[in-house]
C-alpha cells in the first residue's frame, strides 16, 4: 500500500510538472514575460543596460531553443513522411478543394502580417531618418572639426563635449521615435500571434493532406517567430546612447 501511495504521489508530481511546463510555453506566457520599456533610453547606467540585455537575451535564447528544436523535428518528420498520392485521385476532389482553401487562407494571413509589420517599420524608418538627417547638420561639421584638430595635433576636449551634447540630444529625439515604434509594435503583437496560431494549424492540416500519416502538431512555429522578432527589437533600445569621451578613447 505504501508503494502504491508513493507511485500515486509521483504520478501527481509528474503530471503537475508537465501541466506547468505546458502552461509556461503558451503564447500568453511568453507575452507576459516581455518587460515594459525602460523609462530612460539615453541616460541608463551600465548596470541597468547589462540587466536589461541579460533579461532580453535569456528570453530570446529560451524561445530560440524551443523554436529551432521544433523546426528541426518537423523537418525530420516531413523527410520521413511519404507523399499522399491519393489526393490526386478523382474521388478526392473535396480534399483538393479544402487544400486550396487552406493555401489561400495561409497566403491571406501572411499578407496581413507582412502588411502590418511593413507599416510599422516604414513609419519608424521615416521618423528615424528625419531625426538623424536633422542632427547630421550639426554633428557632421563638429566631427569634421575634430578630425582636422586631431590632424593638427590640437586638443579636442571642447569639440568632444559639443559632440557628446549634440549626440545626446539626437539620442533623446530618437528615443521618442523608437519608444513609439515599440509601443505600437507591442500593441499589434497580440494580433500577429493570433495570425501565427492560425497559420500553424493551417500548415499542420495541409501537411496532413500532402503526406500520409502526418501527425506532427506545431506548438510554436509562426506565433513564436513573431514574438522572437519583437524581442530582437528590444535588444536595440540602448543603441543610440552616445559614447562619453573616456569611452571614445578606449575604442
Image: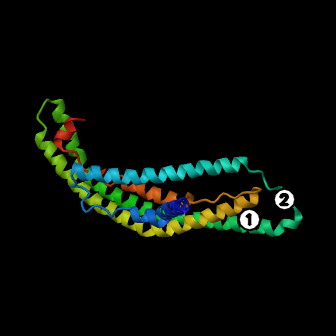
Quadrant position of the C terminus in the picture: top left
Question: Is residue 187 or residue 77 the one in the foreground?
Answer: 77
Residue found at x 66% / y 61%: 204
The answer to whether residue 42 is left or right of residue 226 is left
Residue 114 visible from this viewpoint: no
Q: Quadrant of residue 107?
A: bottom right
Q: Nearer the viewer, residue 99 or 21?
A: 21
Q: Closer to the N terminus: mark 1 or mark 2?
A: 2
Residue at mark 2: 86
Comparing labels 1 and 2, the label whose residue is closer to the camera: 2
- Look at 61% across and 62% down and name the residue there: 200
Label 1, label 2: how many angstroms apart (C-alpha)? 13 Å
- Label 2 crowd bin: few (<14), some (14–19), many (20+), radius 10 Å: some
Q: Which mark is residue 99?
A: 1
Q: Is residue 198 above or below residue 245?
A: below
Nearer-the-camera pick, 120 or 37: 37
Residue 139 x, y percent position in the rendering: 23, 48
- Give the quarter of the figure containing the N terminus: bottom right
The spot of residue 175 in percent (x, y) is 29, 59
On the picture, is 44 further left or further right than 97?
left
Amino acid at each position: 500500500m505504501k508503494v502504491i501511495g508513493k507511485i500515486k504521489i509521483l504520478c501527481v508530481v509528474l503530471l503537475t510538472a508537465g501541466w506547468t511546463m505546458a502552461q509556461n510555453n503558451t503564447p500568453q506566457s511568453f507575452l507576459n514575460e516581455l518587460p515594459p520599456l525602460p523609462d530612460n533610453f539615453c541616460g541608463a547606467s551600465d548596470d541597468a543596460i547589462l540587466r536589461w540585455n541579460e533579461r532580453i537575451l535569456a528570453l530570446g535564447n529560451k524561445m530560440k531553443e524551443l523554436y529551432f528544436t521544433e523546426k528541426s523535428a518537423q523537418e525530420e518528420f516531413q523527410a520521413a513522411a511519404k507523399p499522399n498520392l491519393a489526393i490526386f485521385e478523382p474521388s478526392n476532389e473535396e480534399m483538393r478543394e479544402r487544400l486550396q482553401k487552406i493555401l489561400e487562407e495561409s497566403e491571406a494571413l501572411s499578407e496581413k502580417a507582412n502588411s502590418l509589420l511593413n507599416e510599422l517599420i516604414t513609419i519608424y524608418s521615416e521618423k528615424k531618418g528625419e531625426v538623424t538627417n536633422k542632427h547630421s547638420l550639426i554633428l557632421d561639421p563638429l566631427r569634421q572639426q575634430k578630425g582636422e584638430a586631431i590632424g593638427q595635433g590640437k586638443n579636442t576636449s571642447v569639440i568632444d563635449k559639443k559632440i557628446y551634447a549634440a549626440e545626446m540630444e539626437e539620442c533623446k529625439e530618437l528615443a521618442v521615435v523608437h519608444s513609439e515604434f515599440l509601443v505600437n509594435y507591442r500593441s499589434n503583437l497580440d494580433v500577429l500571434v493570433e495570425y501565427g496560431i492560425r497559420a500553424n494549424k493551417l500548415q499542420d492540416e495541409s501537411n496532413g493532406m500532402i503526406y500520409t500519416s502526418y501527425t506532427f502538431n506545431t506548438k510554436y512555429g509562426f506565433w513564436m517567430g513573431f514574438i522572437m522578432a519583437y524581442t530582437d527589437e528590444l535588444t536595440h533600445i540602448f543603441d543610440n546612447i552616445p559614447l562619453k569621451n573616456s569611452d571614445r578613447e578606449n575604442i
